[in-house]
Image (cartoon, rainbow, N blue to C red):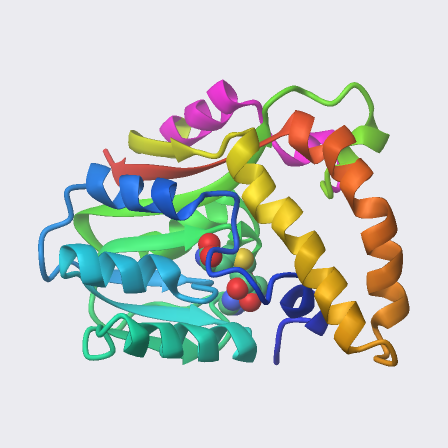
Amino acid sequence: MDLPRIFTIRESGHRIHNPLTAAKLAALGDALHLAPGTRVLDLASGSGEMLCTWARDHGITGTGVDISTVFTAQARARAVELGVADRVEFVHGDAAGHVADHPADLAACVGATWIGGGVAGTAELLGRSLRPAGLMLIGEPYWRRTPPDEQTATDCHAGAIADFLPLPELLEQFQELGYDVVEMMLADQDSWDRYAAAQWLTMRRWLDRNPDDDLADEVRQELATEPARYARATREYLGWGVFALMRR
Ligand code: SAH
């Protein structure tokens, strides 16, 4: 059980595996007015940057669950580096169906709503770990501009145009599911670049170090096509945000 290695090659230089910068992640933590001791559950916690920096900056405690052994190891190391290893723990495991033993004050799934089969299922899953009136965070793509055709959607790594909604409709979807949307932090094109463009140098350096690796041809091919694809599709059409929700 692990994340395919191609992801950890592309994103080995990333602490945040989504299109928010460290500054945006910090601003979101500030905006939520987290009280010291807030208990956070983070499903698909990646390299743990949200839990670790919020533990340092706001005194939260928390548990992250992620299927990647590489990212989970990075998260544990980051907790030690930031001096918060006594407040956050990282569990290697499948977050699909994961329910906390003790209800959390804040339950998050940032950039992995497939673990619940989509936004509705992920909200339901997080809700099972959340105390009444707790905060939920969902990180999810939306169409910044609706793609003109299905090919453009595919080029954004969506399965189809129908996979995502424009921002107003996504906010309405949360409302229709029974949640107040109480905050949001959106990526912009510059912060998208920090996520996407930053992978190119990581891939190139990895190629230089690993020319004979089984994945070298795939990475070489990707590096040749990815910048233009990204500029043509994702950067123009795909928005991304973290949405803070509270059950009505
Ligand atoms: N929330 C983190 C990581 C987002 S990237 C951040 O924003 O930085 C998506 C993450 O989902 C990856 O870390 C990947 O390993 C994890 N993931 C994918 N499928 C998963 C599953 N079934 N259970 C737990 N984690 C999963």
The relative height of residue 141 versus residue 236 in the rendered view (above or below) is below
Span shown in magenta: 159-175
- The residue drawn where x is 39% and y is 65% is 48
Q: Please state, as top left, top right, bottom left or bottom right, where the N terminus lies in the image.
A: bottom right
Q: Please state, as top left, top right, bottom left or bottom right, where the C terminus lies in the image.
A: top left
- The residue drawn where x is 85% and y is 76% is 211
Residue closer to the observer: 62 or 193: 193
x and y, in percent, of residue 69 in the image: 54, 80
- On the rendered structure, is 126 left or right of 169? left
- On the rendered structure, is 239 left or right of 177? right
x and y, in percent, of residue 75 in the image: 41, 72
Residue closer to the observer: 162 or 86: 86
- Which of the 4 image quarters holds residue 32? top left
x and y, in percent, of residue 234 in the image: 69, 34
The relative height of residue 208 versus residue 49 in the rendered view (above or below) is below
x and y, in percent, of residue 210 in the image: 79, 78
- On the rendered structure, is 120 left or right of 85? right
- Which of the 4 image quarters holds residue 228? top right
- The residue drawn where x is 27% and y is 70% is 82
Residue closer to the observer: 181 or 12: 12
Q: Is residue 140 visible?
A: yes
